[in-house]
Amino acid sequence: MRAGRVRMRVRGRCSAVVAALAAAGLLTACSSGSDDSKSDGEKSSPNASASTSASPEAVAKGGTVGAKDSACPLPVTFDFAEKWKPKAVVLEGSELDVLGKQGTVELTCEIDAKPAGNIGFLRVWTSDAKDDTPREVLEAFVADKRTTKQVKYRDTKAGDLTAVEVTYLYASEALDETKKERALAVSTPSGPLVLDLGGLDTQEHEEMLPAYRLAQETMSVE
C-alpha cells in the first residue's frame, strides 16, 4: 500500500518538475529544492526552539556512512536508516554543478529514502572554509532559498559534536505549497558540514524525521 501511495503521489504532484529533475540528473525524483536561489524569508531569535523531534530508536539502522571505504567518504560518520541508499555526489566539472551548491557549502552525499517508501533525501553538504561557524553556515544555507518563513535556530548536539539546527517553512514553487524543512551544521577539522532533510511535502518530512534523528544522534568525527 505504501509503495502504491508513493507512486500515485509522484504521478499526481510531481509532473511539473520531473522533466527538470531528470535533466539535472542530480536531484532525483521530487526532493526538496536546493538550487542556487535567494531568500526573502525571516530569521528568529537564536534561542527559538525547534519543532518536536522523533526518537532515533523509531527506525532500524541500515548501515553507516562517512568512512573512507563507504559509499560517501565524509569528515564525519553516522548511521542511516534501513533500506535508505547512500550515494556520493561528484559535481566538479559538471555543467550542472551550480545545482549542488547552497550558501557556502557543496553537495557531497545523498541518502535516498525511496527504497524505504518515502520521497526525499538526507543530504550532506561540506565546505573547506574552516573559519565559518555552524550558525554562519546555516544562515547562508537558508538565505540561498527563494522563499522561507518561520526560520528558527537552536543550539544542539550531533553525537558528541556541538551543532546548530535550523527549522523553517519553504514555499516550493514547483509544487505550489509550503513544506517543512530542517538542517543542522557542525564544525569538523576539514571544515563545516550540513546535514539537510527536505522531502516532497511536510508529511514526507515528518515520516523521514526518525532517520534524520538517527543520523544526528550517531554522528562522530571520522
Image (cartoon, rainbow, N blue to C red):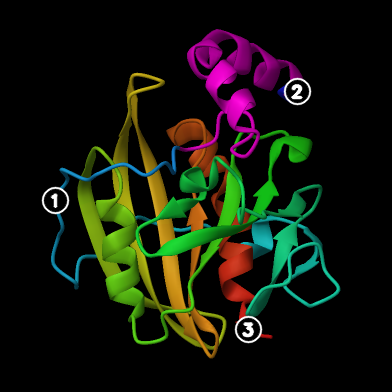
Does the magenta run of residues contain 28? Answer: yes
Residue 199: give x, y in percent of width and height: 52, 38
Q: Is mark 2 on a helix, strand or loop?
A: helix
Q: Is residue 5 shown above or below 104?
A: above
Q: Distance between the residues labelled 3 and 1?
A: 31 Å
As drawn, the label of residue 220 is 3
- At 43% from the left edge and 35% from the top edge, which residue is drawn? 202
Mark found first going from the N terminus, 2 or 1: 2
Mark found first going from the N terminus, 3 or 2: 2
- Can you identify the residue that label 2 sits on? 3
Q: Distance between the residues labelled 3 and 2?
A: 33 Å
Tell me the kind of residue under disc 3.
Answer: Ser
Q: Examine the image and state in which quarter residue 212 appears.
A: bottom right
**CB within 8 Å, label 3 to label 2:** no
Q: Is residue 93 shown above or below 158?
A: above
- Can you identify the residue that label 1 sits on? 42
**CB within 8 Å, label 3 to label 1:** no
- At 72% from the left edge and 33% from the top edge, which residue is drawn? 117
- At 46% from the left edge and 31% from the top edge, which residue is drawn? 201
Q: Is residue 114 shown above or below 219?
A: above
Mark found first going from the N terminus, 3 or 1: 1
Does the magenta run of residues contain 61? Answer: no
Tell me the kind of residue under disc 1.
Answer: Glu
As drawn, the label of residue 4 is none
Front-most of residues 152 and 141: 141
Residue 152: give x, y in percent of width and height: 24, 59
- At 61% from the left edge and 10% from the top edge, which residue is drawn? 11
Q: What element carries label 1?
A: loop
Horizontal arrangement in the rendering, residue 192 relative to residue 50 (left or right):
right
Tell me the kind of residue under disc 2.
Answer: Ala
